[in-house]
Image (tube, helix red, strand yellow):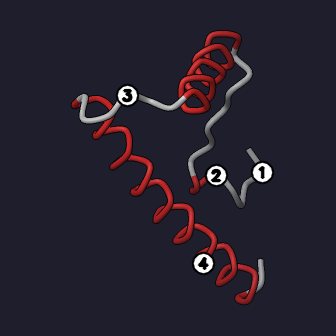
């Protein structure tokens, strides 16, 4: 990969990390019970759990991104 492409990928990873950190904060709030989850949050959680059970969800380590796995 060229240097520019790697820089773009790094920037995207940073954006994803920031969003993930915000999501973690929301999850912690919900687990502590400060607020009840919204309907769309419940639906997204159920969809995630179902996809995980069916094996449709695949998380790939960023280290393997360049390898294409």
The Cα atoms of the two marked residues, 4 and 2, are separated by 17 Å
Task: Residue at 70%, 88% (x, y): give it.
Answer: 3
Q: In this view, does 62 lie to the left or right of 65?
A: left
- As drawn, is 17 to the left or to the right of 40? left
**Percent position (x, y) of residue 64?**
64, 51
Badge 1 is on which residue? 68
* Circles 4, 2 touching at the beta carbon (< 8 Å): no
Q: Residue at x 55, y 25 (%)?
A: 45
- Residue for badge 2: 64
Query: Mark 1 or 4, which is nearer the eye?
Result: 4
Say which label, 4 or 2, has the lower sequence index. 4
Residue depicted at 52% across the width and 71% down the height: 14
- Looking at the rendered structure, the secondary structure element under dot 4 is helix
Q: What element carries label 3?
A: loop
Q: How far apart are marks 1 and 3 (CA)?
A: 40 Å
Q: Earlier in the sequence, mark 1 or mark 4?
A: 4
Q: Is residue 11 above or below residue 36?
A: below
Q: Mark 4 points at which residue?
A: 11
Q: Do the residues labelled 1 and 3 touch (CB within 8 Å)?
A: no
Q: Nearer the viewer, residue 60 or 64?
A: 60
Instruction: Look at the numbered disc 1 and give the secondary structure of its residue.
Output: loop
Element type at mark 2: helix
Circle 2 packing at 10 Å, graded few (<14), some (14-19), many (20+), is few
Looking at the image, is mark 1 or mark 3 earlier in the sequence?
3
Q: Distance between the residues labelled 3 and 4?
A: 33 Å
The residue carrying mark 3 is: 36
């Amino acid at each position: 990969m060229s240097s520019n492409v790697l820089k773009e990928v790094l920037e995207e990873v940073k954006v994803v990390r920031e969003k993930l950190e915000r999501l973690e904060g929301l999850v912690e709030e919900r687990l502590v019970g400060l607020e009840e989850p919204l309907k769309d949050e419940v639906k997204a959680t159920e969809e995630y759990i179902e996809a995980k059970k069916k094996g449709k969800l695949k998380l790939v380590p960023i280290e393997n991104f360049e390898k294409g796995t």
